[in-house]
Amino acid sequence: MRHTLTTHDGLTLHVTTHGRADAAVTVLLAHCWTADEEVWHYQVRDLLDRYGADLRVVTWDARGHGRSEKAPLEACTIENLARDLGAVVDAHAANGPLVLAGHSIGGMTLMALPEIRPDLVHRIRGLLFVSTSSGELGSVTLGLPDVGSARKLIPHVLALRARLLTRRERRRTPSIERYVVNRLLFGEPLRLRDAGLATDQLICCPPATMEGFYRDLMAHERLAGLAAYDDVPAVVLVGSADRLTPPPHARRLAGGIRGARLLVAPGAGHYLPLERSDLVSEHLVALVEGARAERSGGHRLLEGAEAAAHQVGDEAVGADRLG
């Protein structure tokens, strides 16, 4: 079901819900920068196939993305994304346990939630951090020469194209957007349908969204606040070929949450919900199973996450228990 929601600062968000409003557990999926809720379409499919209406699943287009309203430059912050997440929970989550998953800036949104909405932390029974970072993003090289200028130039070039060319013109000649997606965002193997979706999402992204969130990403530092999630079942996933939030960032993040588990997907890039959809879905299901077991009176289960790690076989390596 589709909904609209008004943020604290008056923007309209597009929200999609599945499942009963009184389901025992709610899963909320926060997407990455320059994308929209469709990044999670494989996971939504897998969750609905498994649980049907017995699980509440909520996705939304972040401010300045997809079908949500464009946001002014100064409103494009991770803090505001966390405020929006809190508003989505208030309006559309069932009462009871929450399982949160965040991809890239969506994962950073989860990291900011204890600062913005500490009242929600006690309801969280599972966390899935996908291709994300707790800070120090200024150190990311993208694997490019002339590191500093190249990294800073890309979002500004994309924003300039969005200002000068219509969406139709950029779709007709998406050479730069396709290069960014194929070379910087995805690893191997590259599925054309997934790369095509990411390219079109990038083309549809407003200039202020590109520039405003880039500026805020460079200031993002939330390692210290991760202790709020100590002992919450948490899994950190990263691709070995992720250029934006590479494995050392995932290890730093996992080390900040007591009991968190880190898994590395060989050959994968930054878009794990698309590139390694089965891997992401398996761990999301394991967290849901733990939350459902606790909700029904059982103890908190981590065995589900262990089982998921074994099920994916060679696709996930370096499954370290940290903390």
Image (tube, grey):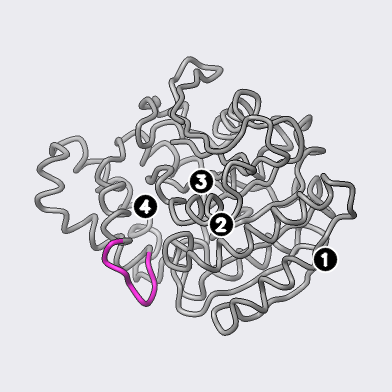
Q: Nearer the viewer, residue 159 or 40?
A: 40
The local secondary structure at tag 3 comes to helix
First-in-chain label (2 vs 3): 2
Q: Is residue 175 left or right of residue 294?
A: left
Q: Is residue 20 left or right of residue 213?
A: right
What's the distance in space between the residues labelled 4 and 2, CA to CA?
19 Å
Segment tinted magenta in the rendering = 186-193
Quadrant the C terminus occupies: bottom right
First-in-chain label (1 vs 3): 3
Q: Quadrant of residue 25?
A: top right
Q: Pinpoint residue 79: horizontal percent, then vertical percent.
A: 59, 33
Q: Are marks 2 and 1 in contact (CB under 8 Å)?
A: no
Read off the residue under disc 3.
Answer: 217
Amino acid at the residue labelled 2: Thr
What's the distance in space between the residues labelled 1 and 3, CA to CA?
26 Å
What's the distance in space between the residues labelled 2 and 3, CA to CA?
11 Å
Amino acid at the residue labelled 4: Lys
Q: Which mark is residue 152?
A: 4
Q: Nearer the viewer, residue 209 or 24?
A: 24
Q: Which mark is residue 323?
A: 1
Q: Are marks 4 and 1 in contact (CB under 8 Å)?
A: no
Read off the residue under disc 2.
Answer: 132
First-in-chain label (4 vs 3): 4
The local secondary structure at tag 2 comes to loop
> Which is closer to the viewer, label 2 or label 3?
2
The local secondary structure at tag 1 comes to loop
| Residue at left offset 80%, top offset 64% | 302
Amino acid at the residue labelled 1: Gly
Relative to 233, does residue 202 appear above or below in the rendering? Answer: above
| Residue at left offset 30%, top offset 35% | 206
